[in-house]
Image: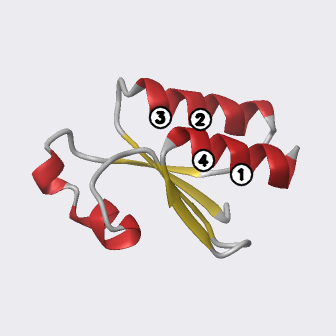
Amino acid sequence: MASITLYELDGCPYCERVADSLEELDIDYESVWVDPPHSERDEVKRLSGQRQVPVLVDEEYGVTMAESDRILEFLETTYA
């Protein structure tokens, strides 16, 4: 089982950037597709404190983060 989970929304360009980076770095991950209405993203809010996506959870490193630029920087410095 993957230790990384990506919470994403279909059609979200920021989510796609993170997913592309995970694939380029050959990192196994699980996608969790969230509902479009912000009001229905309770799981994302519980994890990250906000309802925006993408949110990345890396169990191996004990990291939960939002904002695609921060996630991409984390992936590059940790896994590249």
Q: Amino acid at mark 3?
A: Cys
Q: Secondary structure at mark 4?
A: helix
Q: Which label belongs to residue 74?
A: 1
Q: Residue at x 69, y 39 (%)?
A: 22
Q: Amino acid at mark 2?
A: Ala
Q: Taking the image as drawn, is residue 27 in sight?
A: no
Relative vertical location of residue 15 with respect to residue 7 in this rendering, above or below: above
Residue carrying label 4: 70
Name the foreground residue: 23 vs 67.
Answer: 67
Q: Position of residue 15 (x, y in %)?
A: 47, 34
Measure the alpha-carbon separation of dots 1 and 3.
15 Å
Residues at circles 3 and 4 in contact by the CB criterion of under 8 Å:
no
Neighbour tally class for label 4: few under 14, some 14-19, many 20 plus, Cα within 10 Å: few
Q: Secondary structure at mark 2?
A: helix
Q: Residue at x 72, y 72 (%)?
A: 61
Sequence-wise, the earlier of marks 3 and 4 is: 3
Is 38 situated left or right of 54 in this image? left
Q: Residue at x 66, y 41 (%)?
A: 72
Q: Position of residue 64 (x, y in %)?
A: 54, 66
Residues at circles 2 and 1 in contact by the CB criterion of under 8 Å:
no
Is 65 situated left or right of 61 in this image? left
Sequence-wise, the earlier of marks 4 and 2 is: 2
**Quadrant location of the N terminus in the rendered image:** bottom right
How was the colour assigned to the protein in this rendering?
A: secondary structure
Q: Nearer the viewer, mark 3 or mark 4?
A: 4
Residue carrying label 2: 19
Sequence-wise, the earlier of marks 2 and 1 is: 2
Q: Amino acid at mark 1?
A: Phe
Q: Which label belongs to residue 15?
A: 3
Q: Position of residue 59 (x, y in %)?
A: 64, 72
Quarter of the image where one finds residue 18: top right
Relative vertical location of residue 37 with respect to residue 5 in this rendering, above or below: above
